[in-house]
C-alpha cells in the first residue's frame, strides 16, 4: 500500500467548518474515491488530502504479449471507474485496449488490437449502446470480423443497427451479418450485392423435359447475403390454383402472362382468355390455341358467356368428384380425369368496374346501355367469385391481371382473398400499391435501390407472395412469342379457327339481361312477371307493355312504363285502388293480389 497526497488550493473566505464536506465530495468525484482531508495549511491557504491506494499490478508478462491481465486498485474496483481505468491503462500501454473490466473481481484485461479492429469494436459498441470493452472483436481471414456481443443484445432492437455497421461503417453494401442471439456471437462478413442478369430466358426444353403442370416457372428470385446467385422460383398451383398479377404501368405484365401461358399449354392445360375488347390484340398470338368457347375478348357478353360456361363445367366436374368419392381432380382415374384449364382474365378492372348512372335521365338509351353493361360486369364479378371460392379442386387455374387493384377499382375483398398467389410487378410500386396488391406487404421485401436505378437489370422486376413460400424479389422469365409458338407447333397442340363462344351460347347466358326472351322457356323470369316471379293477373292491367315506338318492354323497363301510365291515369284526380277481399288470391299465400303492383306481400 502507498499513501497518495493531494494539495488543493483554497479560495479566500474558505470556512473549514462549513465547506470541508462539500470540498471533499468534489475531490472524490473528480479524482476517484478514497480521499480524506488530512489538514488545512492556512499560511499557504491550501488543503491537504490523502488516501491509501494499492498499486495496480500486472499479473502476467508484457514482453510482446497479445493480452495480459491487471489487478485493479480498490479505488478502481467500481463499475463507474471503467472509463478511468481504460484511459489510464491504454495510455500506459500504447496499442493495448481494455477488453475486460470486472470491478467485482478487481481485475481487467488488456489486449493488443489493430486500428481496424478498434474501429469495428467502437462502431459496434456505439450501435448497441454499450461500453467498448463489452464487445469483443477479432479479424477474420476474409477481411470481416467475429464478434462477441454484450448480454444486453436484443435482436428486435439491435439487429438493424448491427447490419448498418456492416454495410455502412465497417464494410460496404453487400457485406452482411450472421448473428446468433442465443450464443451472443456475430460475424461481419464481406460480400457482394445480389443482382439479376439483364434477361432471364425461359428454358423451354426444361419445361418439356420436366412436364410438371403444377409448378409454373415465374422467374429468378433475388439472392440473399452470402448466396448472391439468383435462384429459380415457381408457383405451385396444385393446392393453391388461383393467382392475382398486379403491376404498375410498363412493368411487363404481358411478358409474365406469356410465360405462364407457354408453360401451361406445353404441359397439357387448356387455355381460356378473357380481356376487354380493345386489348384483345395482346392475345392474338395465342388465340388459335385457346379451347373452343374459351375466347372471351370480343365483348362483355362473350366474357360473361365464357365464365358462365366454365362455372357450369366446373360444377359438372365437382359432381364427378362426388360420384367417385375423391376430393381433387388429380385423384380421378386417368381415363376419367379432365384436363386442367388455365384461365387468364386480363385488364380485370376494365371488365368489372361499373359506370355511374347519376345524371342520366331514366329511360334514355345511354342510361339503359350503361345499366345493361353494369349488369354484365356484375355477372362477371359473380362468376369470378364463385369460381375462385367454390372450384378450387376441379382443375381450374385462374390468373387475374390488371393495374394495381383495390376495392375502389371494382375488385371486392371477397374475390381477392381467394387468390392465394400474389404478384406485383414494377420497380416503382408505392407503399399504397403494395398494400392493395399483397396480403401482408410488411413481410415482402422491397426492390433494392441499386436494382431500381439499373434500367436493364430492373426491367421485368417485381415482388411475389406465393402460398407456402417465402416472399421474394422477382425477375420474370422472358420468352419471345415466336419461340413460344414454335414450341406449340412442335408439340402438336391442337388449333381452332374461332374459339369464341357461338351466338347461341351467348344468347343462352345473356338473354335475360338484355330483355330478349324470345328463345327462353316459360320458366324464365323475364317478361310480365312481378319481382317475386308471379305472373300479373290479366284483370289488373294489360299483360304486355310497349314504348312510344311500339317496341314491347320487359322487366324493369316494363315496370317503369306501367308506373308512369298509372301516374298519368291518376293526374285528373286521385283514384283510390282497393283490393277486394274476394278478388284473385295468391296461390302461394291465399292473400289478395294488389292490382297496381301485382304483389301480395309474400316472398
Image: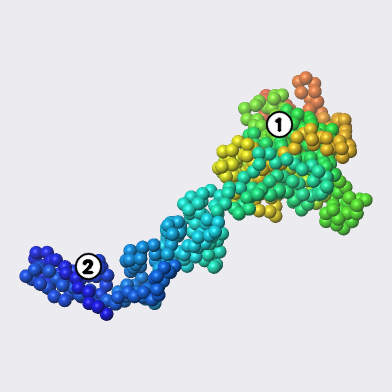
Q: Quadrant of the image for the N terminus?
A: bottom left
Disc 2 secondary structure class = helix
How far across and down, in percent of the image, does residue 308 sit? 81, 40
Q: Colour scheme used in the picture?
A: rainbow
The quarter of the displayed image where residue 359 is located: top right
Q: Residue at x 70, y 44 (%)?
A: 219
Q: Tell which circle, 1 or 2, labels the residue nearer the N-terminal end.
A: 2
Q: Is residue 274 above or below residue 320?
A: above
Q: Please give the residue where the numbered disc 1 appears in the rendered image.
A: 371
How far across and down, in percent of the image, does residue 306 sit? 81, 37
The quarter of the displayed image where residue 48 is located: bottom left
**Cα–Cα span, label 1 and label 2:** 89 Å
Q: Is residue 248 above or below residue 440?
A: above
Disc 1 secondary structure class = helix
Q: Residue at x 83, y 35 (%)?
A: 486
Q: Is residue 345 above or below residue 333?
A: above
Query: Of 533 and 321, which appears nearest the observer?
Result: 321
Query: Of 570 and 70, which appears nearest the observer?
Result: 70
The quarter of the displayed image where residue 581 is located: top right
Q: Residue furthest left?
A: 43
Q: How many marks?
A: 2
Is 13 displayed left or right of 339 in the figure? left
How far across and down, in percent of the image, does residue 24 sit? 20, 71
Numbered label attached to residue 26: 2
Q: Residues within 10 Å of mark 1 (few under 14, many from 20)?
A: some
Is 164 displayed left or right of 464 in the figure? left
Amino acid at each position: 500500500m502507498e499513501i497518495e497526497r493531494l494539495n488543493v488550493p483554497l479560495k479566500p473566505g474558505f470556512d473549514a467548518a462549513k465547506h470541508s464536506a462539500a470540498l471533499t465530495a468534489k475531490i472524490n468525484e473528480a479524482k476517484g474515491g478514497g480521499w480524506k482531508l488530512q489538514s488545512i495549511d492556512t499560511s499557504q491557504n491550501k488543503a491537504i488530502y490523502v488516501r491509501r491506494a494499492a498499486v495496480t499490478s500486472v499479473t502476467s508478462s508484457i514482453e510482446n504479449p497479445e493480452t495480459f491481465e491487471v489487478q485493479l486498485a480498490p479505488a478502481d474496483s467500481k463499475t463507474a471507474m471503467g472509463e478511468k481505468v481504460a484511459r489510464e491503462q491504454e495510455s500506459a500501454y500504447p496499442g493495448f485496449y481494455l477488453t475486460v473490466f470486472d470491478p467485482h473481481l478487481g481485475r481487467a484485461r488488456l489486449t493488443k488490437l489493430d486500428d481496424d479492429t478498434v474501429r469495428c469494436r467502437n462502431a459496434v459498441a456505439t450501435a448497441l449502446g454499450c461500453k467498448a470493452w463489452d464487445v469483443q472483436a477479432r479479424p477474420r481471414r476474409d477481411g470481416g470480423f467475429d464478434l462477441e456481443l454484450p448480454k444486453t443484445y436484443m435482436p428486435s432492437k439491435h439487429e438493424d443497427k448491427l447490419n448498418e455497421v456492416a454495410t455502412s461503417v465497417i464494410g460496404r453494401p453487400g457485406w452482411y451479418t450472421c448473428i446468433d442471439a442465443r450464443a451472443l456471437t456475430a460475424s461481419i462478413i464481406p460480400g457482394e450485392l445480389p443482382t439479376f442478369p439483364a434477361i432471364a430466358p425461359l428454358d423451354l426444353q426444361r419445361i418439356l423435359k420436366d412436364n410438371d403442370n403444377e409448378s409454373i416457372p415465374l422467374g429468378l428470385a433475388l439472392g440473399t447475403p452470402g448466396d448472391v446467385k439468383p435462384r429459380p422460383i415457381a408457383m405451385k398451383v396444385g393446392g393453391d390454383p388461383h393467382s392475382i398479377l398486379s403491376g404498375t404501368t410498363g412493368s411487363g405484365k404481358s411478358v409474365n402472362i406469356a410465360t405462364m401461358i407457354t408453360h401451361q399449354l406445353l404441359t397439357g392445360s387448356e387455355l381460356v382468355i378473357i380481356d376487354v375488347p380493345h386489348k384483345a390484340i395482346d392475345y392474338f398470338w395465342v388465340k388459335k390455341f385457346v379451347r373452343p368457347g374459351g375466347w372471351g375478348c370480343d365483348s362483355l357478353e362473350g366474357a360473361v358467356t365464357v365464365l358462365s360456361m366454365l362455372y357450369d363445367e366446373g360444377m359438372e366436374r365437382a359432381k364427378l368428384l362426388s360420384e367417385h368419392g375423391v376430393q381433387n381432380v388429380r385423384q380421378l382415374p386417368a381415363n376419367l380425369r379432365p384436363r386442367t384449364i388455365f384461365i387468364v382474365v386480363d385488364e380485370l378492372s376494365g371488365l368489372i368496374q361499373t359506370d355511374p348512372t347519376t345524371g342520366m335521365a331514366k329511360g334514355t338509351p345511354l342510361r339503359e346501355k350503361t345499366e345493361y353493361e353494369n349488369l354484365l360486369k356484375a355477372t362477371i364479378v359473380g362468376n369470378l367469385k364463385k369460381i375462385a371460392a367454390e372450384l378450387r379442386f376441379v382443375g381450374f387455374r385462374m390468373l387475374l391481371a390488371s393495374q394495381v387493384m383495390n376495392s375502389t377499382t371494382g375488385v371486392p375483398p371477397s374475390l381477392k382473398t381467394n387468390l392465394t398467389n400474389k404478384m406485383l410487378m414494377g420497380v416503382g410500386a408505392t407503399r399504397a400499391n403494395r398494400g392493395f396488391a399483397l396480403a401482408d406487404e410488411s413481410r415482402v421485401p422491397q426492390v433494392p435501390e441499386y436494382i431500381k436505378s439499373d434500367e436493364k437489370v430492373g426491367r421485368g422486376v417485381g415482388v411475389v407472395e406465393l402460398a407456402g413460400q417465402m416472399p421474394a424479389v422477382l425477375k420474370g422469365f422472358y420468352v419471345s412469342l415466336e419461340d413460344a409458338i414454335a414450341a406449340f407447333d412442335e408439340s402438336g397442340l391442337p388449333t381452332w379457327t374461332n374459339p369464341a363462344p357461338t351466338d347461341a351460347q351467348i344468347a343462352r347466358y345473356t338473354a335475360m339481361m338484355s330483355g330478349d326472351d324470345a328463345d327462353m322457356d316459360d320458366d324464365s323470369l323475364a317478361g310480365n312477371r312481378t319481382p317475386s316471379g308471379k305472373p300479373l293477373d290479366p284483370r289488373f292491367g294489360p299483360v304486355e307493355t310497349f314504348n312510344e315506338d311500339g317496341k314491347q318492354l320487359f322487366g324493369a323497363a316494363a315496370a317503369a312504363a306501367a308506373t308512369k301510365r298509372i301516374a298519368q291515369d291518376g293526374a285528373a284526380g286521385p283514384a283510390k285502388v282497393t283490393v277486394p277481399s274476394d278478388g284473385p288470391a295468391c296461390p302461394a299465400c291465399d292473400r289478395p293480389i294488389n292490382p297496381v303492383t301485382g304483389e301480395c306481400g309474400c316472398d
